[in-house]
Amino acid sequence: MKKKLLLLEDDIALNETVIDYFESLGYNITPVYNGNSALDAIYENNFDLLLLDVNVPDMNGFEILKSVREQNVTTPAIFITSLNSMTDVENGYDSGCDDYIRKPFALKELKLRVETILKREFFHQNSSKIQIDTNIYYDTNSDLLIIDNDEIQLNNKDAKLLKLFLQNKDNLVTHETIYSTLWEYDEEISESALRTYIKNLRKHLGKEKIVSIKKLGYRFTTK
């Protein structure tokens, strides 16, 4: 599945250069040129990463990210800016960014920063424990499922599958995405094994939490 990036950059030439480069790498990248358009795009789409210039029309990148963080948008973000004072760097991190790159920059350096962030599993969590239900928590560090204070150690594949669902709550997760996440390139994909992992999670979380979407995949529901 192609990773979706948002690029806020009002320099049209730089915007097009970054788009061409990341599209050639297989990314799906959406360009915007001002703060209001960026906010609209963030609320209307599920991006994997935000690339935000700071000095742009309408509202600056710091204000945009602070605003969406206040609305519990945890999408990781990299600021792209010509600002270089320590105060500017502090403002960037205070508003909730994950990284900061100064202009001018090499496209390959931006690529490496993007790849590093996208390898992480969860963003802007105050704790390693994620609440799944009133009495169910999942500890992303230890792969422990905690139900009514009882700890259940998940095996590797069950844990990978639950993390994938928690990263895509209430969204369709296709069979292809699950296969590419759970199995390494040199491992043989097993549909029957996947059904077992689904069954294992349903046993702990309740069947209603993981909805099967016929021929497409599954949806982890928080409703």
Image: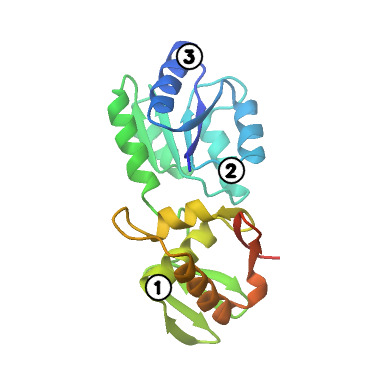
Q: Earlier in the sequence, mark 1 or mark 2?
A: 2
Picture residue at 38% right of the left edge, 23% below the top: 21
How far apart are labels 3 and 1 at the CA level? Answer: 44 Å
Q: Is 211 placed above or below 123 here?
A: below
Q: Which residue is mark 2?
A: 46
Q: Disc 3 residue type?
A: Asp
Q: Disc 1 residue type?
A: Asp
How far apart are labels 3 and 2 at the CA level? Answer: 24 Å
Q: Earlier in the sequence, mark 3 or mark 1?
A: 3
Query: Depth check: 135 or 198 in front?
Result: 198
Q: Quadrant of the C terminus?
A: bottom right
Picture residue at 52% right of the left edge, 56% below the top: 167
How far apart are labels 1 and 2 at the CA level? Answer: 26 Å
Check the image and name the residue furthest to the top: 13
Q: Which residue is mark 1?
A: 143
Check the image and name the residue furthest to the right: 223
Picture residue at 40% right of the left edge, 60% below the top: 189
Q: Disc 2 residue type?
A: Asn
Q: Is 167 left, or right, of 188 in this rendering?
A: right
Q: Any mark on residue 11, and which?
A: 3
**Callout 3 environment at 10 Å: few (<14), some (14 to 19), or many (20+)?**
few
Tell me the element at label 3.
loop
Tell me the element at label 1.
loop
Q: Position of residue 103 (x, y in %)?
A: 34, 21
Query: Depth check: 35 or 218 in front?
Result: 218
Q: Position of residue 38 (x, y in %)?
A: 60, 30
Quadrant of the image occupied by residue 64? top right
